[in-house]
Amino acid sequence: MKQFISTLFDTVAQRLHGTDSRRDDDPYRLARVRKAMLELVGDASNWEAEQLRHRLLVAESARALWFMRPDLLHWLCRAQDERAAMDQVMALQPLFEGLIETSLLSSTRRDRRDRSYGA
C-alpha cells in the first residue's frame, strides 16, 4: 500500500510540475519542424491535405510531430514516387535532433548510403 501511494504521489507531482516530454521542446525549433512539414504538404486544397495540415498545426510536441512522419510519407507517396517522398521525410530528421529521445532518432539511422529503400 505504501508503494502504491508513493507511486500515485509521484504521478500526481509529475503532472502538476509538467515533467512530460513537452517541457524540453524549444518553441522556435518546434515551429521550424512544423513549418518544414507543412511545406511538404504544400498548398494542396483537398480534404486529406487539409486534415494533415490541421493535425500538424495542432500537434503539441516534437514527439507528436515525429510520429506524424508516416502519415506525411503516405500523403507524399500519392503525388510522387516512394523514393522521392522518403528522401523528403528523411531530410526532416536533423530538425528533430535534441527535441526527441535519441533512441527514436537512432532507430531510423540505418546506413542510407546505398539508398536501397523504396526501390
Image: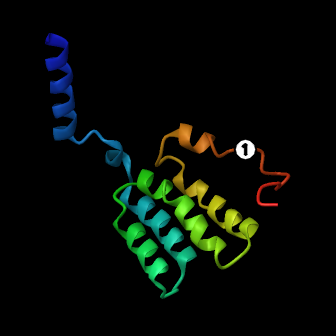
Image quarter (top left, top right, bottom left or bottom right) of the C terminus: bottom right
**Quarter location, residue 2:** top left
Which residue occupies the extreme top position in the image? 2
Image quarter (top left, top right, bottom left or bottom right) of the N terminus: top left
Query: In the shown orientation, is residue 112 left or right of residue 104?
Result: right
Residue drawn where x is 83% and y is 54% of the image? 116
Query: In the shown orientation, is residue 27 left or right of residue 12?
Result: right
Residue drawn where x is 54% and y is 49% of the image? 97
Q: Position of residue 73 (x, y in %)?
A: 60, 65
Residue drawn where x is 48% and y is 71% of the image? 35
Count of numbered labels shown in the rendering = 1
Colour basis: rainbow
| Residue corresponding to mark 1 | 110
**Quarter location, residue 83:** bottom right
Query: In the shown orientation, is residue 10 left or right of residue 75?
Result: left
| Mark 1, other Cα within 10 Å: few <14 / some 14–19 / many ≥20 | few
The secondary structure type at the circle numbered 1 is: loop
Please say if 4 is above or below 76.
above
Q: Position of residue 117 (x, y in %)?
A: 77, 55
Q: Nearer the viewer, residue 27 or 55?
A: 55
Residue drawn where x is 57% and y is 74% of the image? 40
The residue type indicated by label 1 comes to Arg
**Quarter location, residue 78:** bottom right
Please say if 85 is above or below 69.
below
Q: Position of residue 17 (x, y in %)?
A: 19, 39
Please say if 60 is above or below 16.
below
Which residue occupies the extreme right position in the image? 114
Q: Position of residue 105 (x, y in %)?
A: 58, 44
